[in-house]
Amino acid sequence: LVGATSDSCTSKYGRRRPVILAGLVSTWIAGMLFSGAEHMFSGSTSLFFAAPMYWVMDVTINILQTPHRALVADLASEEQQVPMQVVFVFFMAVGNFLGFSIMQIYDVPVEHMLELMFGI
C-alpha cells in the first residue's frame, strides 16, 4: 500500500518525500505515545495502551522505510542498485546501534523513555 501510494504521488515535492514525511511524523507520534504510556495511564492500563502503540510504531517504521528504498531505486543506476541498498541497510544498522547505545546511559532506561524521545 505504501509503495503504491508513493508511486502514484504527484506532489510538487516529489513522489517519495511526502510519504517519507508522513511516515516520520507518524513514527514520532507513535513513539511518543508508546514511551509516554506509563505516564498517561496507571497500572495495567498502560500496558494495554503501550502494546498496540508498539505495533503501530512497527508499522509506521515500515511506512518510513518503504519510500526510502524506493528513492534509492529511483536515483541509483542499474549497477548501483545493490551497493546502494547495502549502504541503506548499513545506515539503518548504525541508527539501531546508536539508539541502543543511547538507552545504555541510564540504569533503568524505561523510566526515562519519554525524555529520551523528546531529546531525539
Image (cartoon, rainbow, N blue to C red):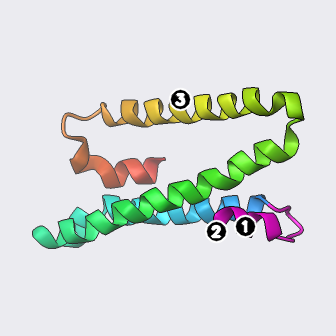
Residue occupying image coordinates x 66% and y 35%: 88
Residue closer to the observer: 23 or 84: 84
Residue occupying image coordinates x 70% and y 61%: 3
Is 8 one of the magenta-colored residues? yes
What is the x, y in percent for residue 96? 46, 35
Q: Is residue 52 visible?
A: yes
From the image, tell me which residue sits under label 2. Answer: 1
Q: Determine whether label 1 and label 2 are within 8 Å by CB.
A: yes
Secondary element at tag 3? helix
Gap in Å between the C-alphas at discs 2 and 3? 27 Å
In the rendered image, the vertical position of residue 12 relative to residue 77, given as above or below: below
For badge 1, the amino acid type reads Ala
For badge 2, the amino acid type reads Leu
Q: Which residues are magenta?
A: 1-15
Which numbered circle lies on residue 94? 3
Secondary element at tag 2? loop
What is the x, y in percent for residue 1? 64, 68
In the rendered image, the vertical position of residue 40 relative to residue 116, given as above or below: below
Comparing marks 2 and 3, which lies closer to the viewer?
2
Q: Determine whether label 1 and label 3 are within 8 Å by CB.
A: no
Is tag 2's residue or tag 3's residue first in the polypeptide sequence? 2
| Residue 3 appears left or right of 80 | left
Task: Tell me the crowding category of disc 3: few under 14, some 14 to 19, or many 20 or more residues within 10 angstroms, Cα based.
Answer: few
Q: Is residue 42 visible?
A: no
Secondary element at tag 1? helix
From the image, tell me which residue sits under label 1. Answer: 4
